[in-house]
Amino acid sequence: QVQLVESGGGLVQPGGSLRLSCAASARIFSFNAMGWYRQAPGKQRELVAQITSGGNIVYVDSVKGRFTISRDNAKNTMYLQMNSLKPEDTAVYYCNAQRFRTYWGQGTQVTVSS
């Protein structure tokens, strides 16, 4: 059973930055893809960014140029660097990994407010 644990969420002012981490209990190079999703109150969960085992990266349009997804295979950890945060980025952010099935973390709250 693969476990994913997110950390790094919190309260930040508009324009600020946060870095989310997702620590996996398995070798992350074995995953076909890993990604970050978010879910705001009253909205559906949406893909924010994804990185495949081949290194291909996609971002939702609303975060392009502000967020950067990366991974450290040696630490079995994936990151999401979030800059120039906006109130509309407020959501619970979930780590996702795919290998034969889909795994989810428990989520970490990100609140962007002055």
Image: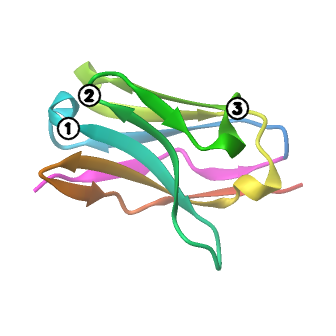
Q: CA distance from mark 1 to mark 2?
A: 6 Å
Residue 3 pos. (x, y %): 22, 53
103 and 25: which is toward the camera: 103
Q: Which mark is residue 53?
A: 2
**Left or right of 1: which side holds 42?**
right
Count of numbered tags? 3
Q: Which amino acid does the dot numbered 2 rest on? A: Ser
Q: Are marks 1 and 3 in contact (CB under 8 Å)?
A: no
Residue tagged by mark 1? 31
Amino acid at the residue labelled 3: Arg
Which span is picked out in magenta?
Answer: 1-13
- Asked if the residue at tag 2 contacts the one at tag 1, i.e. Cβ–Cβ closer than 8 Å, the answer is yes
- In this rendering, position of residue 17 left or right of residue 1: right
For marks 3 and 2 on the same chain, the one whose residue lies earlier in the sequence? 2
**Within the image, what quadrant is residue 101 found in?**
bottom left
- Name the residue that disc number 3 marks: 66
View extreme (bottom): residue: 42
Q: Nearer the viewer, residue 1 or 30?
A: 30
Q: Is residue 99 above or below residue 103?
A: above
- Can residue 112 be seen in the rendering of this structure? no
Q: Residue at 89%, 54% (x, y): give it.
A: 114
**Residue 61 lies in quadrant:** top right
Q: Amino acid at mark 1?
A: Phe
Tell me the distance, in whole angstroms, between the alpha carbons under discs 3 and 2: 22 Å
Which tag, 1 or 2, sits closer to the chain's start? 1
Residue 15 shows in the view: yes
